[in-house]
Amino acid sequence: MTPPEKEQRARQRRLDPLEELRASTEAWLSQFNIAFALMSIIPLLICCYLITVKFFSLSILAGINGMYFLFAVILALLGLLAGRQVIRTVIRRLLDANERMDRFQTMQSEFVHHVAHEFRSPLAIIKGALDNLRDGLYGTLTSEQVEPLTMSNREVARLRRVVGDLLDIGQIESGKLALHRELLVLQEVLRDVTQACQALSTERGLALELQAPEQPIRVHADRDRLSQVFLNLVTNAIKFTPRGGVQVRLTRNGAATQVEVADSGRGIAREDLGRLFVKFERVGAGDQEGSGLGLAIAKAIVELHDGRIWVESESNRGSHFFVRLPAEG
């Protein structure tokens, strides 16, 4: 199966989660009905067994004893049927609640996506106006005016990143995030990423190092989306590393290639590792800015590339993020 076919199938699987939920519900209830049907004949099988092995003769079923025996069998069957109905009702209510919750989450995601989309144009206009002010189009700025202008530019840039993350997560959850794959040399992608992050690492007094083999390692991937993943990992590593440095290592093992982003920062507590790639979770963020979506988006992008992302970390021992992708050639 070619990569575009895999992407199409993955998107189709995510197009209508409610339909998938309904199908799984019906399959589960069918299995439940079969199980209870089998359970309902257990009392009859017990009776046949007792009669067959002659623990008692058929004559014992005559008279008052027979009535008691028949009454016990009827009670057992009624109990099974009543229990089946009660459990079926409980399961149906739980599944209905799950479906309503899923529908609510879908509506919530669509609302967030539409709101984020509406923010793009006003933010672009505000940024254009601020850039014109900065460039002196409306006159020379005084020293007192430069500082609030710089602060406004920084906040607008932050809002644009948040809006971009919200739009990305909306596309991912709706299965509409399209990848534009091409044959890439991974060293070139990582070199561009580390160069883009060099100013931030220098500002924080950190060493940023790229370790990669000379032999080109090629992957069939979307350059912009892959750069987005590695930019997120490297900038996070820099933000959460007060001293020391960040290393980006590229290796190849057979048909797979692996990128490791390692830092000497404060690390992540073991109990927080499971929440790291969950959207809106800001594990150990403290006073750091962020939407809590970056790693969730990175995970989704890597998986769309048929890859895997994970982290190894301990408190006060730094963090090691790994991205493994299928290599070409």
Image (tube, helix red, strand yellow):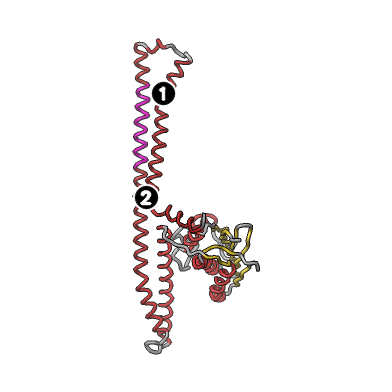
Labelled disc at residue 18: 2
Nearer to the camera, 18 or 119: 18
- For the C terminus, give its image quadrant: bottom right
Q: Which residues lie in the magenta part?
A: 73-92
Which residue is pictured at 35% across the width and 72% down the height? Answer: 121
Disc 1 crowd, CA 10 A, few/some/many (<14, 14-19, 20+): some
Is residue 203 shown above or below 182? below
**How far apart, in angstroms, are the residues tagged by discs 2 and 1?**
39 Å
Magenta stretch mostly in which secondary structure?
Answer: helix
| Residue 181 locus on image (x, y percent) | 50, 64
The type of residue carrying mark 2 is Leu
Residue 108, quarter of picture: bottom left
Quarter-of-image position of residue 259: bottom right
Q: Position of residue 163 (x, y in %)?
A: 40, 68
CB within 8 Å, label 2 to label 1? no
Mark sitting on residue 43:
1
**Residue 223 located left or right of residue 128:** right
Q: Could you tell me if residue 313 is visible in this image? A: no
Q: Residue at x 37, y 17 (%)?
A: 69
Farthest-out residue, right: 214
**Residue 24: within the magenta?**
no
Q: Say whether residue 179 is left or right of residue 73.
A: right
Q: Secondary structure at mark 2?
A: helix
Residue 192 % position (x, y):
55, 72
In percent of width and height, residue 105 lies at 37, 55
Q: Is residue 79 above or below residue 249?
A: above
